[in-house]
Amino acid sequence: MKLLFASLLLSSATTIAATDYSYQTLYYNQTLDHTQPFHPSNDRWSHRYLLNDDFWATPKDEDLTSSSDCPGPIMFYTGNEGPVDAFWSGNGFMMEMAESWGGLIVFGEERYYGPSIPSSDYSYMSTQQVLEDYVELLEYVKKEYKAESCPVIAFGGSYGGTLTTFFRAGYPHAVQGGLASSAPVGNYDPIGWESHGIDSYTFSDIVTKQYADADSQCLSKIWEATEIINSGNSEDLTKTFNLCDATGLGPNSQSELFLYGLEGLPQLNYPYAINDMPGWPVQSACDILTSSSSDTLIEAAAKVTGMALSYDLKGACFETLDEGPGNVPGDGPGAGPWGYQSCTETLHLFNSRGPADGGIREYNLDMSVIEEICKDSWGEFDVQPNTNALTDRYGGYKLGDGLVDVSNIIWSVGDIDPWGGGCFHPEYAKDGSEDDGLYYFVIEKGAHHYDLRGEHENDTDSVRDVREKERDIIKGWIQDFV
Ligand SMILES: *[C@@H]1O[C@H](CO)[C@@H](O)[C@H](O)[C@H]1NC(C)=O
Ligand SMILES: *[C@@H]1O[C@H](CO)[C@@H](O)[C@H](O)[C@H]1NC(C)=O
């Protein structure tokens, strides 16, 4: 999911929301290890969080009143894999609600990202530790704001949406409801894939379909470009792609960076421009490729790669990525914190079809290769992926199927999002799930966690409609609680 992270970094560079929401950067002395008994001398570390109290206790919406018991709702972003400030500008929806309801906006940083580093090694990295950081952080913030009796609504996209789901399911006393957008919880429950209509190719098949749907010639141009790049001169390619050195092209073949960019772009297929990324960028990528002849196809491929990975072909050279190209589709094991998470709890057992089978990149997942990467990167901790760990602890498909006792969660998914396969879809919901406060929304032509973004003049009707429903549901949760 690092692809997503790269793109979020990009969108944080400037604020595109109609209203500019600022934040304070704060730190909390967080418990190092939530699984050990409390002792006053236990180690603590500096946990970064972002906060905005501009609207706190001053609701504009007359249905929601502020009282001394509860000045307002707490809108909490369950930070995911990346520095938390990178997620701020892509989450305008929760801020707009906070603005009208007198809410306090808080973004928790996932441990081991940004400056939130509990220890010099990864001994204390797990989803459980992350969620219990959030429980403790919220207790502290509530005390600071005299908001002990106020509801907390969690928001999260992608793995952050998975965290929101597990937060509400596992710690219902700490959070009264959650909006989990593009949360691929099902990906961590592979035993349930077949009965929920997905397989290991679903992610990459959705990627392929986006290119095929954008232009009937797009895939064949991608295949042609791949061949030309693979047989190209590496020095020339390094220059054309503006890489710092030839290793940046990919660890196994010269086309891997290009294909990595293409694989990530469909997640970002939003209808309007975000910084240097044009609106409907998949269409733009296809336009660039299909309007090029064989002579200029390498330049076109470099342009698409720069656009997809947000670097400038004329700017500073692009450093070699150490985890992405050639890896599991959507990113997997490697030397960074997400690589560690993939080597323990979050490995996606994804495959991808090559051109011979109509796809853009052939990738056949081989557990022995994965285990070797994990051993090379994390040998000292002796960790290996357990693809059932999160489901064992928090529940997988049973949560979305309404087979366990959870309530007050909205699951939303875009129908063009490659991560959508592992998300919870309405057709698997139990009858009457709304009575438990479980809701399932599909955003037509919606990319990755589109609904979490702030309102934009060029939003689709579908996202407007979904946000309106989400807003009503969340408001109801808050009114019921206070
Ligand atoms: C956090 O811990 C440090 C070191 O123990 C201490 O100096 C600091 O005052 C603490 N900060 C807060 C806000 O409690
Ligand atoms: C919205 O779309 C129109 C038509 O494509 C475009 O001219 C305008 O710049 C877009 N607005 C924004 C803020 O991107």
Image: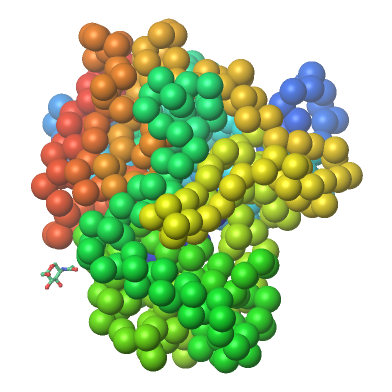
- Observer-nearest of 95 and 3: 3
- Observer-nearest of 334 and 118: 334
* Residue that protrudes farthest toward the front in the picture: 356
* Residue that appears at 28% across and 42% down: 414
- Observer-nearest of 466 and 47: 466
* Residue that appears at 24% across and 35% down: 442
Name the spot of residue 106 as percent of width and height, x first: 45, 42
Could you tell whether 287 is left or right of 2 in the image? Answer: left
Name the spot of residue 421 as percent of width and height, x first: 38, 36
Relative to 405, is 80 above or below? below
Name the spot of residue 280 as percent of width and height, x first: 25, 64
Q: The C terminus is located in which quarter?
A: top left
Residue 164 can be seen, yes or no = no
Could you tell whether 251 is left or right of 364 in the image? Answer: right
Which colour assignment does the render follow? Answer: rainbow
Name the spot of residue 417 as percent of width and height, x first: 34, 47
* Residue that protrudes farthest toward the right in the picture: 380
Q: How many marks?
A: 0
Residue 391 can be seen, yes or no = yes
Hey, which quadrant is residue 308 in on the image?
bottom left
Relative to 350, is 66 above or below? above
* Residue that protrudes farthest toward the left in the picture: 461
* Residue that appears at 41% across and 74% down: 224
* Residue that appears at 30% across and 17% down: 429
Relative to 288, is 69 above or below? above
Could you tell whether 305 is left or right of 59 in the image? Answer: right
